[in-house]
Amino acid sequence: MNAVVRFLRTPTLGRSVVALLTVAILLLLVVNVTTFVMIQRTAAFNDEIDSLQATRRTARNVLIDLLNAETGQRGFLLTGRSNFLAPYRTAAGTVETDLVELRRLTVDDAELEPLIEAMDDTAMAKLEELRATIDLTTSGQIGQAIQRVRGGTGLVLMDRVRDDIADVDLILSDRIQERTRQSERSAFVTVAVNAVAGALILVLGLISGVLVRRYITDLDKARADLDQVNAGLEETVRERTSALTRANEEVQRFAYIVSHDLRSPLVNVMGFTSELETAGKTIDRQMTVVESDAPGLVEAEALTAVREDMPEAVAFIRASTEKMDRLINAILKLSRDGRRNLVPETMDMAPMIQKIADSVRHQTDAAEAEIVVGDLPWIESDRLSLEQVFGNLIDNAVKYLDPARPGHIAITGADLPGGWVEYAIADNGRGIAPRDHERVFELFRRAGRQDRPGEGLGLAFVRNSVRRLGGSIDMASELGKGSTFRLKFPKRLILIEAGDTL
């Protein structure tokens, strides 16, 4: 309902077209209902007209039958021959049938029923008058029969029948004309409603056409504007990408140069530290000789400085220079890997990761841990980068296992919709506190107890490598329960330039 309300409130082409279609459908429904009603009314009028016409014909047939019966009676009176009575006999039976039909057609008709009853009595009286004259003639009393005809009773009855039929015919004619007009009006209304509805539907169609045409015009204009924007955007993206590439190269060169320049004084410091250590040993030997030959000449503070303070200081200097050397080597490694061109190749990941797992078997055996490599989907990417990524993650998982329980590391994978693949490295090690979930990916940052060797570069290197391959890395971890790293890569690595992913 909310979606429908939003659709109705938002002025869009779709809403306008739907509104026009709704109006058109309602209009057609009204037209259909109106046409149905008009057709029913027209049919009722036509049925009534047919009934009135039938009543009118039947009434006229009564007059015609009486005339035929009278013709047969006159012929028989004039000739005395019985074959002239055939029209009379036929008409006499038909008159009675027609009168029954008239009574049926006019039943419950307050206006016609009295007239039909009167005409029925008159017609039957006329038939009785004809039958009486024929009976007199048949019995040889032809003079009396002629005398009865000359009395005019038959003429009066016929005139009365004509008058009754004329009255009935007049009423029926008026009714037929009225029903005909009503039927014509219904037909006209039906045609008019259909014509108006057709015109309205045509107007609605024209409006819909105009709206659609305007929409298509606006769409073409918007598409043209979008093409222009895209063209400018593509150019901007190319410029920004080029600038970013140059900046990245500058950063890499800067890191390489800085690391290289730092190494020179570091080598000097390490060399002079060795000389200082050697000099300290020489002085210690000399102090030992002096101490044995002339103990009174050697002060205790000098011996402490030579034998304790100086070696301790040299040890601190050596540890610091070694750490700086490792850091410089790590920076140089990141710089070299950033400049290396990626080479995509199709790889069966399970055997490759199994080799990495086998390479740390001595560590897992010592920690009573196991690495389980599941069925992994293939991928087309840079082999060296993937080996370094999974090698770092598996090495970290082994390094930070919890000695309080048997270690378990599982590597799984699955294909994802849209041409992606996902791998997961899950362990039951120490885990990482929520506040450190992001910082572990930063350079030179570590989390938890610092009782394992490392410089805080591994996960930063992993994330950088994963991004170069067009993928992403996410982590879910709980302190004391373990960690899961999820790697998502495109199924096929596409390069737009050497070493750059699309």
Image: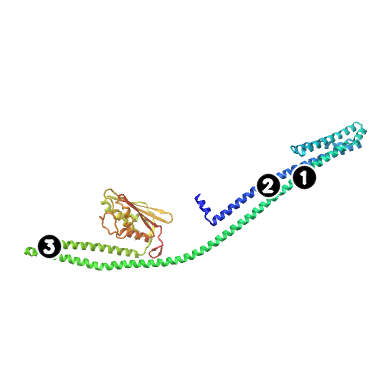
Examine the image and state in which quarter residue 97 appears. Answer: top right
Are there few (<14), some (14-19), or many (20+) residues within 10 Å of tag 3? few
Of residues 4 and 343, the one nearer the viewer is 4
Estimate how packed mark 2 is, as few (under 14), some (14 to 19) or many (20 or more) residues with alpha carbons within 10 Å. some
The residue lying at 55 percent from left, 62 percent from top is: 217
Which residue was labeled with disc 2? Answer: 39
Q: Nearer the viewer, mark 1 or mark 2?
A: 1
Task: Answer whether residue 239 is visible to the viewer in this image.
Answer: yes
Q: Position of residue 271 (x, y in %)?
A: 21, 67
Whether residue 72 is visible, yes or no, is no
Residue at 72% of width from left, 45% of height from top?
46
Q: Is residue 267 left or right of residue 111?
A: left
Mark 2 or mark 3, which is nearer the start of the sequence?
2
x%, y% of residue 216? 55, 61
Badge 3 is on which residue? 301
Where is residue 208, by image quadrant? Answer: bottom right
Residue 454 appears left or right of 421: left
| Mark toward the start of the polypeptide (1 vs 3) | 1
Quick check: 344 above or below 174? Answer: below
- For marks 1 and 2, give the CA distance: 23 Å
Q: Looking at this view, name the residue that lies furthest to the top.
A: 139
- Residue at (25, 63) in percent of width and height: 324
Residue designated by label 1? 174
Residue type, numbered disc 2: Ile
Q: Evaluate if marks 1 and 3 touch, with contact meaning CB atoms under 8 Å apart.
A: no
Residue at 52% x, 54% y is: 9
**124 and 246: which one is in front?**
124
- Helix, strand or loop at mark 3: helix
Q: Nearer the viewer, mark 1 or mark 3?
A: 1
Identify which amino acid the numbered label 1 is placed on.
Asp
Specify the label residue 362 is tagged with.
none
